[in-house]
Each structure stands twice: as structure tokens, then as C-alpha cells.
Image (spheres, grey):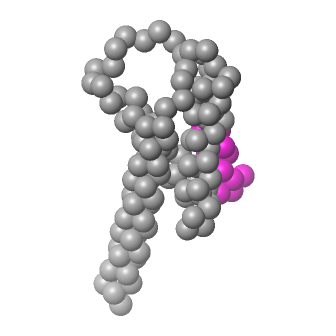
Amino acid sequence: MTRRRLWRAAFWLAVLAGITASLWPGPQLPDPWFPAADKLQHALAYAVLFLLGRQAGYRSNWGLPLALLALGVTIELAQGAFTETRSAEWLDGLADAVGIAVGRWLALWVERQRADSTGVEQVNGR
């Protein structure tokens, strides 16, 4: 199995796990350690999804971010419509968008670092 296929499998398993966890009946949890903990979890999850998608080869400038945002909004709507223990919150969608933006920034930063280090090695290697 190629590396790209492994990354794609990891990406789609993460998407499936996220959908399942988001629509599973919500457990009774203690109060979060700070008020915006849920929003931070959303942002982190979508940053990781973006990074996995990028590693999987989904490199369209707008395709991956828009698809992940659509996923987040769809999950929120499904939580409001089909679950009794969860609710739809527009701030969760905003946190998803922030996570996507952070993931995109991180991916671009890492790619720039790799390109810079490759260029330095080529210059030093001469």
C-alpha cells in the first residue's frame, strides 16, 4: 500500500470517527475545565482533519477547506435534527472554520519549511 493510500485511509477513518462521535448520544460529562473547551476541541479536530487531508493528497486551494466546513455544518444540523442529547450551535461551526484555517496555515508553514530546507541542502551540497 502506498503512503498516499495510508494517509487517505487515515483521513477517511478520522472523518468517519468524527461523524460517529458527533452523532452518538452525548455522555453526561463533568463541566469542562474552562468555558470554551468544546470550541477548542472543534478547532483542534478540524485542524487535524485538514492536515490529514493535505497529507492524503487533497491539495485543492478551496476544495478541502470547503468540504470540511460543509461537513461541520452538516454535522451541526444533524445534531439538532436527529439527536436528543446534542444540539446545533453556530459557534461550533465557527470553531470548525477556525480549525480549518489553522490547519491550512500549519500545512503551508510546514511545506515552506520543507522547501527552504531542501533549497539550503542543494546550495550546501554543491
Q: Residue at x 41, y 49 (%)?
A: 98
Q: Position of residue 92 (x, y in %)?
A: 46, 36
Q: Is 2 rendered above or below residue 17?
A: below
Q: Is 74 rendered above or below residue 86?
A: below
Q: Quadrant of residue 20?
A: top right
Q: Position of residue 3 (x, y in %)?
A: 63, 55
Q: Residue at x 34, y 87 (%)?
A: 123
> Which residues lie in the magenta part?
1-15
Q: Is 71 rendered above or below residue 33?
A: below
Q: Residue at x 58, y 41 (%)?
A: 73
Q: Residue at x 33, y 30 (%)?
A: 36
Magenta stretch: dominant secondary structure: helix
Q: Position of residue 27 (x, y in %)?
A: 51, 12
- Residue placed furthest toward the right: 1
Q: Position of residue 34 (x, y in %)?
A: 27, 24
Can residue 46 be seen from the camera position used here? yes
Q: Is 104 rendered above or below residue 30?
A: below
Q: Quadrant of the C terminus?
A: bottom left
Q: Give the mark count.
A: 0
Q: Is residue 9 magenta?
A: yes
Q: Quadrant of residue 38?
A: top left
- Residue placed furthest toward the bottom: 126
Can residue 3 be seen from the camera position used here? no
Pick the front one: 94 or 63: 94
Q: Is residue 68 magenta?
A: no
